[in-house]
Image: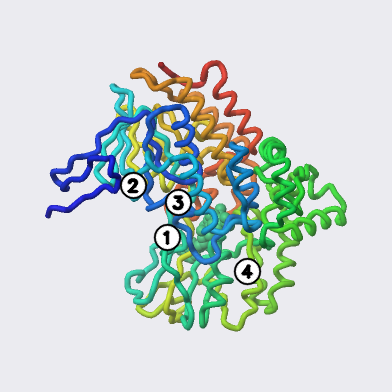
Amino acid sequence: MLLRYVNSDKNDSTIGVRGKLKKNQETFDVVIVGAGFAGMYMQHKIQQRGLSVRLYEAGSGVGGTWYWNRYPGARVDVESVEYSYSFDDDLQQDWSWSERYASQPELMRYANYFADRFSLRENMRCDTKVTAAVYDAEKLNWHITTSQGDEVSAKYCVLATGFLSSGSVPDFKGLNDYNGNTYLTSKWPKEDINFKDQKVAVIGTGSSAVQSIPIIAKQADHLTVFQRTPSFSIPARNGPMDREYEKRVKSDYPEWRRRQRYESRAGFIALNFQPTAPNNKSAIDVSDEERLIDYETRWESGGLCYYNSFVDLLTNEKANDTLAEFVRNKIREKVKDPETAELLAPKDYPIMAKRLCADTNYYETYNRENVSLVSIKDSPIEKLTKKGVVVGGHEYEVDSVIFATGFDAVTGAIKNIDVRGVAGESLDEHWEGAPRAYLGLMSNGFPNLFFLDGPCANGALVSPMLLSEHQVEWVDRCINEIGVGLGAEIVPTLEAEDAWMQHMHDVGKDSLLHLANSWYMGANIPGKPRALLSYLGGLESYRQQCSSGEANDYGNFVKTR
Ligand code: N01
């Protein structure tokens, strides 16, 4: 069957008929995959250098993970003034956030504003998935194939595919038998969905569920939440942007950013609207009173500021349990039914070993008459039927099922592309057992290929904006140094990659992250090898290591120019 194929770009002569398709066979200096915040900044840097660039994006618009995660209540859990580009002072002065934590629609407005302000659209192709990237070891360039039939070449390929972009639905028995509506939080429809008069099920209780449950509960006739593992959640204390606060930040933005970059653990510093250094004391060396003051102050401030609390919270179980018990008691205070409160209070893993959630009225929602919690910890979901969800032999009849079941994180989106390096080795083969990437930026055997927010960097535990900016600037300098000549090629040595993996292991081995089954460890996806996917050395150490990678004319790399 002949299929009409139309590429939306008028400048591109790719209108043709599939089968006799006249493919886009252009050659670029750089091809970027993904129009999230990292990919767009990369494109801007490449354009500034005057190099030719094409960015491919699977969605119909920019925004990356924010484009797809439009579920009710979706918003960022890092303060807006900190979760925004810092590289351009005019940009950060001109843009004004309306809330302390930006909502998904506002983040989309910001992403679109950025694309327009820096003239990114012309070199971007949306609705286009990159399906394969194959390195030509003779021509020293990447051959890239897309779902729209493009077959382009590029000297460099940058995978800015995001670490939370490949949504995952467990293979529940009877999934296709269910006759009601189904939704996945990470692929939420664009149209307004209202659950009025409906019986609704939410499966999962991670960040996406924690944000959406309070809103869905207000709409639905009845909401049943199926929980396998409870989350620790901290009140976000979101609200309209305090204009005095915004003015204060903007009057000293470069200094604020410097402190985020160099004097924070995770890239955020706001505590009760003041830039504040991390607490470098041990939670078990201080008095009960001092510890409680720290915990209460952070509880009142809201959000993720516990990542800047006592220094040993993620390395010492005893220290960790002081905070875990503090939060469990807060949950017990909020939830009226003691049995429900105990089900919601996590006891089987250290706090922050799974990413903290930031909520608005999450626990309070379980005090509503129309909300019930079903623990599936000891009695998993047996199946879906035509009418609903079966647990413990009981069928819960519902009109809609919402899967808030997470992501094949960090590596999922990269693995959806058939990436082949020198000698045809696939990235999957190279990453068998666990992903390997020197500085989280490049893998041995895959020259001129960069990862942004990929594995083996510290994406999981730092503000993604800061990490993206740092990595983009590193890649930009590297491309500039090596150049785009016919003979230009750079790849990390196997020794450098091995040493980085060893360093990652050494830094992470005592972390309590190992004690939870989370996406940090790849443990949420059946069959995925259990391995720490992120570097836990902190932002400053990562920055220093990246500088060492550039030292001695990229001494840890094999390169030609
Ligand atoms: O995904 P998750 P998420 N049967 O993996 C459950 C970021 N984010 O989309 O824990 C039953 O945390 C699973 O149970 P368990 C943020 O970094 C940020 O919520 O595996 N249940 C869990 O409860 C976050 O960490 C924001 O036992 C099953 C849930 O599904 C990351 O994205 C907002 C199951 C998945 O939780 C991921 O969050 C949203 C099964 N077979 C997301 N399989 C912000 O605030 C899975 N589950 C910015």
User: For the residues marked 4 and 1, what is the alpha-carbon distance in whole angstroms?
Assistant: 22 Å
State which tag comes first along the sequence, 4 or 2.
2
State which tag comes first along the sequence, 3 or 2.
2
- Rendered view: 134 above or below 463: above
State which tag comes first along the sequence, 3 or 1.
3
Please name the residue that numbered disc 2 is placed on. Answer: 129
| Mark 3 element type | loop
> Could you tell me which residue is drawn at 38 percent across and 63 percent down?
171
Please name the residue that numbered disc 1 is placed on. Answer: 187
Name the disc covering residue 419, or none: none
User: For the residues marked 3 and 2, what is the alpha-carbon distance in whole angstroms?
Assistant: 13 Å
Amino acid at circle 4: Tyr
> Could you tell me which residue is drawn at 23 percent across and 49 percent down?
6
User: For the residues marked 4 and 2, what is the alpha-carbon distance in whole angstroms?
Assistant: 36 Å
Q: Position of residue 503 (x, y in %)?
A: 59, 32
Q: Is ligand 1 less than 8 Å from the beta carbon at label 3?
A: no
Please name the residue that numbered disc 3 is placed on. Answer: 165
Amino acid at circle 2: Lys
Amino acid at circle 1: Lys
State which tag comes first along the sequence, 3 or 4.
3
| Mark 4 element type | helix
Amino acid at circle 3: Ser
Numbered marks: total? 4
